[in-house]
Image (tube, rainbow, N blue to C red):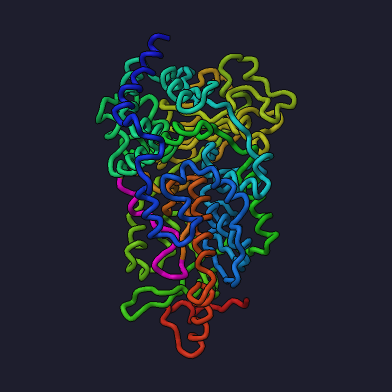
Amino acid sequence: MAKVLLLLSLWTPFAAAFVPASMTRRALVDVPKMVATADETFTSDGAKRQVGNDAFLNENLMARAQNGPGKKNDEKLKIGIIGAGLAGMVAAMDLADAGHDIEMFETRPFVGGKVSSWKDKDGNHIEMGLHVFFGCYYNLFGIMQRTGGFDDNLRLKEHIHTFVNEGGKLGALDFRFPIGAPVSGLRSFALTEQLEWGDKYHNAVRLALSPIVRALVDFDGGMDMVRELDDISFTQWFQKFGGSRGSLDRMWDAIAYALGFVDCDNISARCMLTIFMLFAIRTEASVLRMLDGSPQTGLHDPILKYLEDRDVKINLSTGVRDIVHEVDEDGVPTRVKGIVYGPKETYKGYDVVIAATDVPGIKKILPESFRKHEMLDKIYNLDTVPIATVQVRFDGWVTELQDEARMMDVSGDQSDGRGAGIDNLLYSVDTEFSCFADLALTSPGDYYKPGEGSLIQAVFDERAFKRSNEQLVEDCIKQLHKVFPSSRKLNCTWSNVVKLGQSLYREKPGQDKFRPSQATPISNFFLAGSYTYQDYLDSMEGATRSGLMVADEIIARADGPKGLAAMAKANKERSEVEPAMASPKPFFADVATA
C-alpha cells in the first residue's frame, strides 16, 4: 500500500505545475481553436457541435442522435449515397427524417462496411473485425436507442481491461472503484499487475507530465496540447520525459494495436492521448459493451428496419462506377450530376451525392479531376492498415484458467454467457493478436452453439497478414495455447479467416491534417466515413459522428434561394437548353427510370 500511495502522490506536484491556483476547469480558453475552425468549415450548428473540445464532454450529443435532426426541410432533395456502411446508414436515417428521397448503393451483398457480418453456408456468423463499444460512444448509443437496439442488443462488461500473458498470467487495468474518474484510473495504473514497479514509477512520472493531468482542471488547455501532438509518435512523446520502454512493451503496445493496429512507435500521440483523455475525464468512457450477437443482428438490422419504414431504397451488390459531374473552363469540378452504377453502367441523376466509403473506397471512386481540389487531393496521403480476423471454435472453454473440469464441460444449456471463462475483451502483448474475445461468452446470442465451447475471435495485424489462412489458424491456436496453457487439452472444431487488405486508416503521425470535412468544395458533393474529420478516432463512433455531421450539413443547406434544392432546379432548367460538361460515361450508359 505504501508503494501505491507513493505512485499516486507523484501526480500532485507535477499537475500543480500546469494549473494556476485561480484557474477553473474551463477558464483558460473561452473559444477553443477547433471551434473557430469549425465555424469556418461547417455550415450547420449540429456539425459544429461534433468538433472542438466541447464535443468530448457534450452528453447532449446522445440525445441529438436519438431524437434525429429535429427539422424537416421545406424542399425535398433526391440524394444518392455511395456506400451502406455505418456512416452512410446514419446519414440516411437523418436525411429521410428531414423529408428527403434517399437511395443507397453498396458493392457488397450486405451492409455495414468495416462492421459487416454475414452467415456462411453452414449458418456460422462471420465478421471482419472485433467490435467493442466504449462508454464514450455517445452518438452511436443515441442511434441504437433511436432504432430500439440499445437495451436489448448490448451486453455490459465488468469495468476492467484484462491483459493475458504467457503462461496464463493475468494483468489488468481495474477501474472498479467506488470513486470514479480520475481516481479510479489513477488507482488502476498504480495497482496493475501488468507492469513491474520500476515501470509503474516511470509510467506515473510521464503521465503526471501529460496533457491528461492538465485536462482534469482545464480541459480546453489539455485538449489543445493533445491536438498539437499529432506529428509525433506515442513512443516519442512517452519517452521524452521519463516513460520507460518496458511500459510500452508490456502494456501500451497492446492498447495501440487494439485502437489502430499499429504499435506505439508508429501511432500518433494524439490518437492515444485522445482516448485516454476521455478515460480520465469520464468514468463511463472506459466501460466496455459488446453486442449480444453479430453486428448484422444487433446493430444493422434495427437500422435497416428504420430505413425501410421511411422508404429508403438500398441496392446491394451494386457498385458505383463513376461520379458524373460538371467542370469549369479549367477542368475543375463544380457540380455533381449523378452516378454510374452496376454491370450495365446505368446512369442516374441526383440533386446531392454522398460518398460514404472508407479510405480505399473513396480513392477508387473519386474521378481524377476531383484531385484539382486541394481538400480532396489530400485524401490520397491517407494510408490504411491490413488486418486478418481469425475465428476458431473449440470443444471446451479456452479462457477458463482455474477449473480444468469446468473447462472441458460443454454439456447442457450454457447459453446467455453461462459458459466458463472470461466474459470480456482481452488484450495480450505475448501474441500477434493484440485484442481478442470468446464470442460464445461475450456475444452468445449468435455465437454460442449447444454442445460446443469457446468461439475465439482474434484480430491479427500486418505482422502476420501475409500468411496463408491455414497458417493463421495454426498460429492462432498455438498462441492461444501459449497464453492459456490448459487449452492444449481442447480441440479446434471449426475455423474461419477474413482478410481485409485495407482496413482502418493508419493513425500514424501527421495524418490529421489530411482528413477532409464532410462538405467539399463541390457544392452538392459530400463525404462521410470515419476517416473524415470528426475529432475522433477511426471507429464505429467516428463513423456515426460523420454520418450525423454530413446530414446536418445537407439539411442546413437544402432550403432557401441559394440552397441545394434551388441549385438543383436551376441546373435542371439550364441542362434542358445546353449540354453539360460532364464525364463521358453517361453517353454510353443506360439511363435509369425514376
Q: Residue at x 47, y 54 (%)?
A: 529
Where 442 sits versus 123, above or below?
above
- Residue 474 makes an appearance in the image: no
Q: Is residue 184 magenta?
A: no
Q: Which residue ends up furthest to the left in the rendered image?
A: 240
**Of residues 498 and 28, which is closer to you in this image?**
28
- Residue 557 makes an appearance in the image: yes
Q: Which residue ends up furthest to the top in the rendered image?
A: 2
Percent of width and height locating residue 127: 56, 43
Where 162 sits versus 519, above or below?
above
Q: Residue at x 58, y 57 (%)?
A: 69
Q: Is 570 positioned to the left or the right of 294 in the image?
A: left
Q: Which residue ends up furthest to the right in the rendered image?
A: 412
**Of residues 347 and 74, which is closer to you in this image?**
74
- Using the rendered view, name the quadrant where residue 218 is placed: top left
Q: Which residue ends up furthest to the front in the rendered image?
A: 22
Q: Which residues are magenta?
A: 510-525
**Of residues 565 and 349, which is closer to you in this image?**
565
**Of residues 479 and 68, which is closer to you in this image?**
68
What kind of secondary structure does the magenta stretch mostly adopt? loop
Q: Is 315 positioned to the left or the right of 547 in the image?
A: right
Percent of width and height locating residue 578: 45, 89
- For the N terminus, the quadrant is top left
Where 140 sits versus 373, above or below?
above
Q: Residue at x 26, y 25 (%)?
A: 242
Where 296 sits versus 407, above or below?
below
Q: Residue at x 44, y 83 (%)?
A: 580
Percent of width and height locating residue 468: 45, 41
- For the C terminus, the quadrant is bottom right
Percent of width and height locating residue 322: 46, 70
